[in-house]
Image (tube, helix red, strand yellow):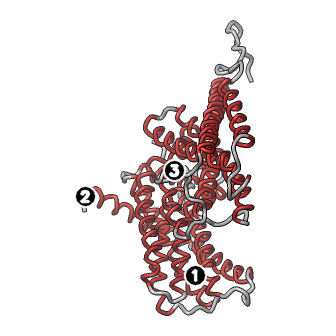
Amino acid sequence: MTDPTRGILVSAWVIARKDLAIEFRTRSAFLSAIVFTLLSIVVFFFAWDPTAVGPLDLAPGVLWVTFTFSGMLGLHRAFAVEARDGAMDALLLAPVPRESIFLGKLLANLAFVLGVQTVALPAVSLFYNLPLGAAALPIAGVLVLASIGLVSVGTLFAGMTANTRMTELLLPVLALPFFIPVVIPAAQSTADLLAGRPLADVFVWLRILLAFDLVFLFACTVAFPFTLED
Amino acid sequence: MTPAPTGSAPAPTAPTARTGIDWVAVVAALVTVAAFVRAIWFTPPDLLQGYAQKIMYVHVPTIWVAFLALGLSALAGAFWLFLKDPRLDRFAESSAEVGVVFTTGVLITGPIWAKPIWGAWWVWDARLTLTLVLWFLFLGYLVLRGAIDDRELRARYSAVVGLLGALLIPFVHLSVYIFRTQHPMPVVANPEGIQMPAVMQVTFFFSLFAFTLMYVAFVRARMALATDRDALEDASTAER
């Protein structure tokens, strides 16, 4: 690893720790995201006739719709904590590369989203009466892969929309089209894995997810400095 | 508002005010009407699809213009990031708006054809989904533009969204393509040559030309509006 890359990652880690420390001390966003997730899982159950649609057909969709929207809650938080007292200006004045700010925010968001998912996945398994069994680990892998993609795009857009008039509405309007090629492979592979199909069946989808992660992680990191005022 | 200082002659109109007829728009409208007349009365209907096939003379040129408009918009945004020329941003804005109008046209003309031929207004086919996502993407782009007052910031954000959108398209295509497609395969851009009789080809390319001309006329008009708006903003800021 070259020295500048190392520097970027070290300062990213510091920023991520700062964000997580704030979140850990207040816990406000995390707890509301968990409650929101559990509520949506419950509400979705009543949106279908359980005697007509099997839980196995329902669960992957519910899981991914819920994750997408609860992730959005976490993304707002990332730059909202910098809004007060000119914190964002202070962060920009800090002698760190701007890529580090982005990657730090991204890491904190990723921890947030994965934290919500560790509660949501067992909850879906419980409420929809779907034992995860051997599929638990591969599904966790799908969750991680999909989250990296969602959070990369989401963090960039959250930073941008934080400066606009309609932050809450604009973030989903901008980000959801980008979530489509993540949610399709993620939901499809979750469905396949829950149905007990072998891992080889979902490789096509995992490859799309991995490619999306690599392309957008890189592109968003490069694009972030362009979204800041000089 | 303070009264204008006496002595300096007040400008009678906005600095960019245009007078007279927009001849590009007139020609584009005439050519488009001519293309429609030829498509409706002077081109035979398709052997299998009957009259429903004629919508292709509208549908395909529309999607061509939509892709052209959105692609050029993203490209102009990318150039803006390095050149910072406000004209590039005005072009990106205008082209994106025209592109959204044409994409809406595609999403309207498609179902009109699909109902008699496929039996359903809408199916979640790869190309339909891609077009729909593209439409949402640029609607979001326009909403974003509307939510930012600062011209420089607006241009910057738009450029980034446009570029990421260009990266997104192959992924949407790939992920929905695995769902399998039922859209007709390309008739014109087909590796085995154009799969269409000559009389239909003439109508098709005539229509393609007409729609491209319409694109140019629309973008010109929309850019003139953007230029006037910016000039008006500058003037009212200077007055204050």
Please tell me the numbered disc located at residue A120.
1
Residue at x 45%, y 68% (from the top left corner): A208
Q: CA distance from mark 3 to mark 1?
A: 47 Å
Q: CA distance from mark 2 to mark 1?
A: 39 Å
Residue marked by disc 2: A3
Q: Is residue B198 left or right of residue A97?
A: right
Residue A32 falls in image quadrant: bottom right
A135 is higher (above) or lower (below) than B112: below
**Label 3 lies in what chain?**
B
Quarter of the figure with the N terminus of chain A: bottom left
Residue at x 67%, y 77% (from the top left corner): A40
Instruction: Please tell me how crowded label 3 is: few (under 14), some (14-19), or many (20+) other residues with Cα within 10 Å.
Output: few
Instruction: Give amino acid for label 3.
Output: Ala
Instruction: Give amino acid for label 2.
Output: Asp
**Label 1 lies in what chain?**
A
Residue B120 falls in image quadrant: bottom right
Residue at x 46%, y 69% (from the top left corner): A209
Residue marked by disc 3: B189
Residue A153 image position (x, y, % from top left): 50, 60
Q: CA distance from mark 3 to mark 2?
A: 49 Å
Same chain letter for marks 2 and 1: yes
At numbered mark 2, what does the secondary structure look like: helix, strand or loop?
A: helix
Instruction: Give amino acid for label 1.
Output: Ala
A58 is higher (above) or lower (below) than B143: below
Same chain letter for marks 3 and 1: no
Quarter of the figure with the C terminus of chain A: top left
Q: Is residue A110 visible?
A: yes
Q: Nearer the viewer, residue B51 or B84?
A: B51
**Residue projecting furthest to the left:** A2
